[in-house]
Image: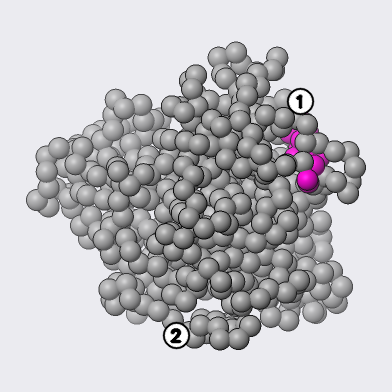
Amino acid sequence: MKRTHQFLTFIVVICFIYALNLTLRTVEVAPTDQTAHSNFSTSFIQTTYNLNSKTRVSFRLHSPDIISEPSQFLSVPGYTCVTKISTLPPAVDQSSIFNFTTTITTDLKILFIGDSIMQQFTQSFYSSVLIHESNVTAKAKDYSWGGIDGRHVILRSFINGKDPRLSGLHVCSSISTPVHGGGVVAYYRLLDLPYRGGEKTYVYCKNEKGWSKSDVRELINYELKANDGQTRPLVLANSSHDNAQTTWYKSTDADQGFSNTSTERVGKFNAIVLRPPGPGWMELHEITRERIIESILLLHDLFGVETVILSTLMFNNNVLTFKDWEDMLKINEMITDVANTWNGDASGVKFVLVQDMAAFTNAILWMNANHLGYNVSFCITKQNSEQDVHDKWDLENSKFLLHRLHMKGNGWKFNPSISMVCNTAPICIPEIVTLPNGTSIDVGKLNDLCEMNVTADPSQCFFNRFSRDGMHWCVETIGPRYSASIACLLGCIYNGDMDKKYEKATNDKKDNIMSSIRYCENECNQRFMSLLPVEQYWLDSKVNVYSKSNM
């Protein structure tokens, strides 16, 4: 397996963080003039007090006391991680690894596509592009029924039950415009990687795979200035197509915000962030190189995008065997290779980048496993080649991921991984699970934890603020890093008109431009898809942070 050099940097960062008791800081000087450059091995991430017109996407980092955590648009209570029932490990609780929030300014049109996990991260991103006022105190419950911001519209959604305040609102499509900076951010729920044969006249988006042109038209024809700033309460939106057992909702007047005039509607998106919905909705063997490439090409045809950001697959409770884990790592290698070998001249999509959510969430899992008492190591000390380090760190000592918290009888399809949901070590409980192929595995016996002096009550697994259920992630905690990483990756292309320079460049210069974009991409992942603390001086509401490829 081949990996980009960001993975080695990630390992080194983790080793140093723990060796120095989480006090690692790169040596930087806060900006004293209009612009200052990072000394983080390269200078692709920059800071300034005054943005220029060629900076199309930038972000600021804040203390949570200034801008609250991104929970304003979260709509499913079961996915949220409130402090009453969850906490972070002491080592990272108050550090600048997680203890900050992000606001984003952009004029780009960005579409997020994926399942309920992508819904969460999009809702966190909505907070980043809409909530720029100080001391915002709006809570998620305000959103689930009455709306919080008139610039944000639910086009289609459903609930499991009769009251969204209790069961949560599951969004099929939504859009925010204009966001801070004048851009557009939208979400489209797809339960598999889109392909041409998956087109349907109508998609029952609660649990049906596929896509429809009517859903696409609803997003691209949305009026850019349709929203007047007034909150938009939810109203019933059942139609003749829908299952009568499901209750559907949309924002008030959502269907009045459409325009056929090209200058007034979204028209096309600049970029799509795509999360393959597996393992879960898609089996791992279904996520192939050919399917990913077909999805990228189709998304250009449907939405006009020239940039696609692929998120690597994250561990969840649908990973039932060690072979599943190995297969997932191979898929992530394939995703990276698709991006690295993409020919921007052969299709309408010019740029394919990777957001390395796998590296980020794996770092969290390994760190939390150490916190719980597992004997796992971040630092691989073998005196082998760099390639060996790349190949083995996320396989060695990783079987702890399959140690599960006993939640049987509580409506959970699969028990969650202890290292993903627990902040305190629970009792070990032998539990034999028979897989579809007839193989029996013990997912409950925890040899490492059984040797620890822990309580005999499994309820004593006090939840952490990384995941509530072993499937979804606590975006209140990791959402700010997620949002910053997307803004950073997009800046590699759109800040400084790199996209326009690429169109006009000769073949040799195009290679140089793509090389610069790749280095910028790597730094964005190293900075934000890791446990590297952010620079302390960035936590200043007046400092704008942005990325820019060097050409």
Q: Nearer the viewer, residue 97 or 415?
A: 97
Residue under the image location 37 percent in, 39 percent down: 469
Q: Would residue 35 appear left or right of 28 to someone viewing this image?
A: right
User: Within the magenta stretch, is there residue 216?
Assistant: yes
Residue 201, labelled with which disc?
Answer: 1
Crowding at label 1, few (<14), some or many (≥20) Cα neighbours within 10 Å? Answer: few
User: Within the magenta stretch, is there residue 480?
Assistant: no
Q: Nearer the viewer, residue 155 or 269?
A: 155
Percent position (x, y) of residue 393?
Answer: 38, 65
Describe the element under mark 2 as helix, strand or loop: loop
Q: Nearer the viewer, residue 399 or 6?
A: 6
Residue under the image location 49 percent in, 86 percent down: 29
Residue under the image location 72 percent in, 62 percent down: 351
Residues shaded magenta: 212-225
Crowding at label 2, few (<14), some or many (≥20) Cα neighbours within 10 Å? Answer: few
Residue under the image location 36 percent in, 77 percent down: 24
Percent position (x, y) of residue 157?
Answer: 60, 30
Separation of residues labelled 2 and 1 (CA atoms):
56 Å
Percent position (x, y) of residue 312?
Answer: 54, 55
Q: Would residue 158 appear left or right of 531 to someone viewing this image?
A: right
Q: Nearer the viewer, residue 436 or 532?
A: 532
Residue 27, labelled with which disc?
Answer: 2
Q: Would residue 461 appear left or right of 311 to someone viewing this image?
A: left
Color style of the picture:
one colour
